[in-house]
Image (tube, rainbow, N blue to C red):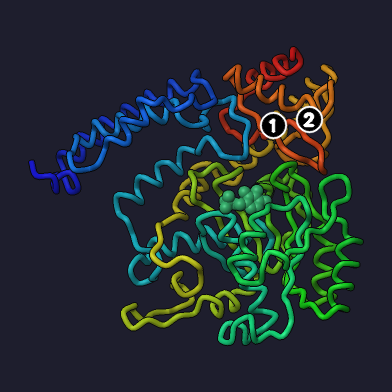
Amino acid sequence: MQDIDSLFPSIGEMRSIEDQLSQKLADVRQRSMTRRTTPEPLSPDWLANLKSKSFDQTEELSVAMDWVIEALETGIVQMTHPGHLGLFNPSPNFASECADRIVSAFNPQVCVYTHAPAAVEIERHTINQIALKIGMPAESEGHFTSGGAEANATSVLCALQAKFPDYGEDGLMSLGSQPMIYVSAESHLAWLKIAHSVGIGRRAVRLIATDGQGRMDADCLTSTLERDVESGLAPVMIAATAGTTNAGMIDPLAECRAMADRFGLWLHVDAAWGGALIASPKHRSNLSGIENADSITLDAHKWFATTMGTGIFFTSRPEILGNVFRVSASYMPESDSSKDYYSNSMQWSRRFIGLKMFLALCSAGWNGFAEHVERSIRLTDRLAESLATGGWTRVNSSPMGVACFVPPKGNADVDRCVNAVHGDGRFWVSKAKFEGQSVLRACVTNGRTDEETIDRLGSFLASL
Ligand SMILES: *Cc1c(COP(=O)(O)O)cnc(C)c1O
């Protein structure tokens, strides 16, 4: 067998290797239920072995895959473990795993409509249905992104374009004043990176004070905007967070809309993980007002539990997107550019990302996601109740599946408690800052977590 045959094996060989891989992954899943949640330190032998792979010599693909699978079983935080209560990284929903395999087998090029009409229509339909569920205006459009950070970066570009129609041609230097964006001090700090890379600079990000409960203080927003306008700065966008990363708090969306209207600004709502509440008729009202945003970020790879790399950007002003990302290239086929993702989104060659959400929605329906979200919230409340009896205090009042706790001995004891949890290995929680204080954060968005796990964690924490 030639080395090149490893890249393109026969159909028969592919089938045999894939069948074996499926068996192995099924075993991996079985073992994942009882594995330690925390990674073991990488051994010097393992690292030496890794570094010895200079790729001058080859090994069987199946041997290399076994080596990788074994490494991942101990060398990463185990997202698929029922006790993993961290950072929204989900136990992926199975439909999205299947989608990943299908997409790999076809590898459609989704950036041009005519190359992948079936794939693009599936993505467009999925986006439309989610936008409808959010309650956005009918003309709204959007696209799948690599994640929330890309979607948020897209919102800044749209805001600049909307405010300064010539900025795309003439650049920031032509503006004559410094563009500013407004986010809360508890927002996701990718905003700073975005401001840096977009070219408005990190100091263009105004971190508006919060109200003691992790929500943007509307009065502080107003006075900051008034002051900035007075001193000749150029506000372009308010980005409200609907579900802060650390504590699941929601900025006052109606006030943010009113301020955006008063100052002529783009309103973005970063609902990267909290947006999942749209699925639940019971909890949807917490997001009231989100439908009036100019643009929205929603990460399917968080609370909707698709595999990684599935963000979504929505906008009720799609013509702006077409303006920001417009392009004409002689080597690209001519077609209806409104359906060509290369000319209305950041990425060019692009994976058929949206199939993950499509298959999950086909098989579980909105109702399945509603149950998933509601169960998360129930389990979060269950943990909070059990900890309250043990003297722990929940400090965030989020309507979502995340709770921030202070141990009975106070904030200074958080490190010890989190280390004890990681040392035990049956659960995974994180350390976070909420309104300046150190807290233990349990994010119960993992679809594999059950009552038993929550109760065991509750007793373990109470015993510390
Ligand atoms: C996770 C998160 C992001 C970043 O999204 P990625 O998918 O990690 O790029 C942005 N905003 C909020 C509120 C988030 O929780």
State the separation of the CA atoms marked 2 and 1. 8 Å
Name the residue located 82 percent from the left edge and 43 percent from the top edge: 435
Task: Examine the rendering and report whether any part of residue 272 can be seen.
Answer: no
Residue type indicated by callout 1:
Ala
Q: Is residue 381 above or below residue 154?
A: above
Q: Which mark is residue 235?
A: none
Q: Which residue is mark 1?
A: 442
Name the residue located 72 percent from the left edge and 48 percent from the top edge: 243
Query: Tags 2 and 1 in contact by the CB under 8 Å rule?
Result: yes
The front one of 294 and 141 is 294
The front one of 236 and 231 is 231
Q: Quadrant of the N terminus?
A: top left
* Local SS, label 1: strand
The front one of 335 and 21 is 21
Q: Which residue is mark 2?
A: 405
437 left or right, relative to 108: right
Name the residue located 43 percent from the left edge and 79 percent from the top edge: 336
Quadrant in the rendering for residue 450: top right
* Local SS, label 2: strand
How far across and down, in percent of the image, does residue 441 sit?
A: 71, 33
Mark 2, residues whose alpha carbon is within 10 Å: few (<14), some, or many (≥20)? Answer: many
**Which residue is farthest top?**
463
How far across and down, in percent of the image, does residue 339 sit?
A: 46, 73
Name the residue located 70 percent from the left edge and 80 percent from the top edge: 163
138 left or right, relative to 25: right
How far across and down, in percent of the image, does residue 225 sit?
A: 85, 70
